[in-house]
Image (cartoon, rainbow, N blue to C red):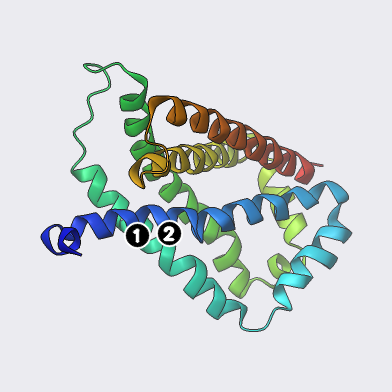
């Protein structure tokens, strides 16, 4: 408690990392699985996955409380951390410093991508019935354009890296991996998780293609 009172950033940083894992990270994993269902075609994706989500009671409230607000805090405090960042990857060329730097840069890229993605799906669906009724066709139209597919691929890989690397760093920050050996082993586990999620995500993107 004394540490919280002496340095409120201590609590904010831990809240920032915790929300990055739960619920934001958990939602990313669910969203990647959700989009991976595209491989079963439009009828399954629209009729089973999208219809199930749209049929959930209080879905807008759940999206605001469990996704939007935690994401806004995580992104907002992350921007503050980026502004205070003193990492010098060229001067200090060890892996942990590079990962620290890439974590912050990837967060900015993800934020830009999310604004684009939410605008072209969730927000556009508010006034376009065709998007709500045929989200598969809408995504297929978007991703059939090579430049848009590239943007989505970049956003996907940045998001997966940010989650996997953030989970590895969280183990250190929270004192779960105290030794160099434990940090290295857990780092490999997180890297494996990142590769798995990237494979699921890419498979889902390809599933939307004609």
Residue appearing at x 62%, y 77% in the figure: 59
Q: Label 1's element? A: helix
Q: Are marks 1 and 2 in contact (CB under 8 Å)?
A: yes
Residue appearing at x 18%, y 43% in the figure: 84
Q: Mark 1 points at which residue?
A: 15
Q: Is residue 13 left or right of residue 83?
A: right
Q: How far apart are marks 1 and 2 (CA)?
A: 6 Å
Q: Position of residue 199 (x, y in %)?
A: 69, 35
How dense is the environment of label 1, judged by Cα within 10 Å: few (below 14), some, or many (20 and up)? some
Q: In this view, does 20 lie to the left or right of 41?
A: left
Dividing the picture into quarters, in which one does residue 48 lie? Answer: bottom right
Q: Is residue 74 left or right of residue 116?
A: left
Above/below status of 183 relative to 30: above
Residue appearing at x 68%, y 43% in the figure: 143
How dense is the environment of label 2, judged by Cα within 10 Å: few (below 14), some, or many (20 and up)? many
Q: Residue 19 — which label?
A: 2
Q: Residue 157 — which label?
A: none
Q: Where is residue 178 in the image (x, y as percent from the top left)?
A: 37, 35
Residue appearing at x 64%, y 40% in the figure: 197
Q: Position of residue 88 (x, y in %)?
A: 22, 24
Dividing the picture into quarters, in which one does residue 5 lie? Answer: bottom left
Above/below status of 149 relative to 128: above
Above/below status of 175 relative to 50: above
Q: Which of 8 and 46 is in front in this view?
A: 8
Dividing the picture into quarters, in which one does residue 83 lie? Answer: top left
Q: Nearer the viewer, residue 121 or 188?
A: 188
> Which residue reaches farthest left?
6
The quarter in which the C terminus is drawn is: top right
Q: Label 2's element? A: helix
């Amino acid at each position: 408690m004394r540490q919280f009172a002496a340095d409120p950033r201590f609590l904010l940083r831990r809240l920032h990392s915790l929300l990055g894992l739960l619920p934001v990270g958990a939602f990313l994993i669910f969203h990647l699985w959700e989009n991976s269902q595209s491989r079963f075609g439009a009828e399954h994706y629209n009729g089973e996955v999208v219809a199930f989500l749209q049929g959930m009671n209080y879905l807008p409230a759940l999206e605001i409380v469990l996704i939007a607000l935690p994401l806004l805090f995580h992104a907002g405090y992350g921007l503050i951390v980026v502004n205070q960042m003193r990492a010098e990857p060229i001067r200090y060329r060890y892996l942990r410093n590079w990962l620290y730097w890439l974590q912050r840069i990837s967060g900015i890229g993800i934020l830009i991508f999310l604004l684009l993605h939410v605008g072209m799906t969730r927000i556009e669906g508010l006034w376009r019935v065709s998007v709500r009724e045929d989200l598969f066709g809408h995504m297929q139209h978007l991703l059939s354009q090579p430049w848009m597919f590239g943007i989505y691929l970049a956003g996907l890989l940045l998001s997966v890296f940010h989650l996997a690397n953030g989970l590895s760093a969280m183990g250190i920050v929270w004192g779960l991996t105290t030794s160099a050996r434990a940090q290295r082993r857990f780092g490999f586990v997180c890297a494996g998780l990142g590769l798995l999620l990237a494979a699921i995500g890419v498979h889902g993107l390809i599933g939307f293609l004609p």
